[in-house]
Image (cartoon, rainbow, N blue to C red):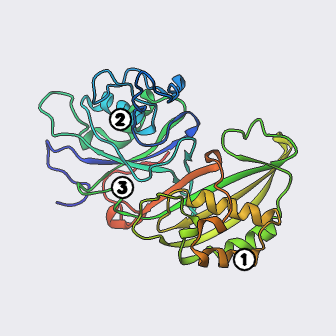
Amino acid sequence: MERGRYARGRMPRYKLTIAYDGTDFVGWQKQEPPERGPESKLPEPDASKVLEGYESVRPGRMVLRSVQAVLERAVREAVREPVLVKGASRTDSGVHAGGFFPDGRRGGQVAAFTCSDGDGAGIGWPEERGAWRLVQTLNSKLPPDLLVLDAEVVGESFDPIGDCTAKGYSYTIFCGKTRPLWQRRNAYFYRGSLDVALMREGAKAMVGEHDFASFAAAGHGRRTTVRTVYGCEVSEEACPRDDGTLVRIKVWGNGFLYNMVRILGGTLVAVGAGKIAPGDVAGIIEAKDRTKAGATLPPEGLCLEWVEYAPAFGGREGRAGEQVSR
């Protein structure tokens, strides 16, 4: 069967591109707070991050406010049945999604779902109902900090994780004398200034295929720490509203280890602060030793800008089916 063409009565698989402010989410993945016994020292879950009205798979258990859980609830209401929404990247609490590809296209987190073929009237989302109408319906059911940007029909086997060919991230740092007000949710505050020219020199060493063990958090769970970084750039712009400057690191590659971008950012901040020489970055990579790299920067500055796929799996060339972008 051709991609994007489903027999009447068959429900298609939909690929969604979404953006979100991660501040008030516990991350992408659905999760429940750990169980607390009578003498438990675990803190009570943050009430602002408990998702009201969402059924846990275990009766009596609460569900935390994750992007996946909130999006699944909206999809369930739209298609009138429970569905599993799978995402391309399991972003952490406080991490954002949404940005632009290098060629200017709008990007973000990618998710996909398939309805059952459905026995009841109104169940599912047939292809003839339209992808843009699906976008509008979902957005009408989502909170202000989560937005569906785009929807398209993809092949039944489309896997947001397994079919991904590249990802792009940015990390934003606010440099100034006082903490920012307007950039507080999406930038890390660095008191003072950074030498962006030095950071650009240090960033050059990141490009290429390397063993990035020095930039992986303990317990990353991957069989190999070898990754290919296609590009790493550092830019600077004025931020007069908060009386400072924004330094933005953009990095893209075929995949990233847990906390890799935040550690990469911490290393380049140390370079910009004069604590690490730009020429020493290559040696940090070669050391394959986490203690040699910079600090792990906090999550609020990190943003998943885009996720790319080969044309056969919903990439930018030769897309089949209905695709919309507003």
Q: Residue furthest left?
A: 119
* Mark 2 residue crowding within 10 angstroms, few (<14) / some (14–19) / many (20+): many
Q: Are marks 1 and 2 in contact (CB under 8 Å)?
A: no
Query: Mark 2 or mark 3, which has the lower sequence index?
Result: 2
Query: Mark 1 or mark 2, which has the lower sequence index?
Result: 2
Real-space CA distance between mark 2 and mark 3, rounded to the nearest whole angstrom: 15 Å
Question: Which residue is disc 3 drawn over?
Answer: 160
Residue 268 marker: none
Above or below, 206 against 163 in this view is below
Mark 1 secondary-structure assignment: helix
Question: Which residue is disc 1 drawn over?
Answer: 280
* Closer to the eye: label 3 or 1: 1
Q: Three-letter amino acid code at disc 3? A: Pro
Residue 72 marker: 2
Picture quarter with the N terminus: bottom left
* Mark 3 residue crowding within 10 angstroms, few (<14) / some (14–19) / many (20+): many
Query: Mark 3 or mark 1, which has the lower sequence index?
Result: 3
Q: Three-letter amino acid code at disc 1? A: Asp
